[in-house]
Amino acid sequence: MKYIKLFILSIAAFFTTNCTTIKVNSEITKNSREQNREYYQLKVYSLNSEEQVIVMDTYLKQAYLPALKRLNLSKIGVFKQLKKETDTIKKIFVLIPFKTFEQFLEIENGLRNDKAYLNVASKYLNASYDQPPYLRIESTLMKAFVDFPKMKLPNLNAPKADRVYELRSYESATDTYYQNKVDMFNAGGEIKLFDRLNFNSVFYGEVISGAKMPNLMYLTTFSDMTSRDKHWEQFGNSPEWKELTAIEKYKNTVSHADIMLLYPTEYSDY
């Protein structure tokens, strides 16, 4: 009987130790994934003349992007909207990834102390009040999704001028519906579906500061418009998507969607 009790106690100790180890390892993995999540700033410059477009292109290409790279930032995307006859306001989108939040906070101070930047950017920085280089700048700050913690560059061979980059913003009616939509991408497997269908996703971000919260944003990329349309047709007809949309938790999670069709500038990193 004594040996039986010792055996039972040994078994109990074994399972207790291993369960504790599994729990600790799970927490370490969770914390590691959390620490690896990047931050993204999306800057949108609104312009109302071709002169402003020229000034901004020159500034971004010759001054801003080189300065950011001197601050050890990379994978910087610069995009423009596909032209529409009804568009009167032109926009330039600049997407900047940061490894840490501190890196984002240091950017302005870094620019102020960069003599090369201040010299090359002088026309932009010293523009007069009646000839500004832009109408407005809108800035959105995001944190990468848990299941897509780092930006991935698209694997496309098509010329930049032919490509279609699709930036989407999904707004939700409440924080709860928003969290459910984020969960749909992560645990629900929507990101995995995008990957399986080769959408060439660049990032998925939870908006932590912006004008349309609560909302998330993500960017998918295609060789051309035909490829884009074909991919979305496959997505809508996939069994995974039909299964996801039938789950009660994921219903009514998007109250408004903005779809922006873009193309990369010749000086964009991708």
Image (spheres, rainbow, N blue to C red):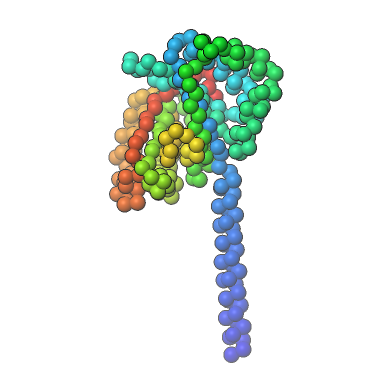
Which residue ends up furthest to the bottom in the rendered image? 1
Image-quadrant location for residue 59: top right
Is 188 drawn above or below residue 130 in the view shown? below
Residue beneath the point at 56% across and 47% down = 34
Res. 196 in view: no
Which of these two is toward me, 31 or 59? 59
Residue beneath the point at 44% across and 33% down = 211
Is 146 drawn above or below residue 234 in the view shown? below
Q: How many marks?
A: 0
Res. 210 in view: yes
Q: Is residue 206 left or right of residue 177?
A: right
Residue beneath the point at 49% across and 32% down = 140
Is 31 drawn above or below residue 119 in the view shown? below
The N terminus, quarter of image: bottom right
Horizontal and vertical percent position of residue 265 = 49, 19
Which residue ends up furthest to the front in the rendered image? 129
Horizontal and vertical percent position of residue 182 = 43, 45
Q: Is residue 123 left or right of residue 161?
A: right
Horizontal and vertical percent position of residue 45 = 48, 21
Residue beneath the point at 52% across and 40% down = 143
Q: Is residue 247 left or right of residue 164?
A: left
Which of these two is toward me, 191 or 71? 71
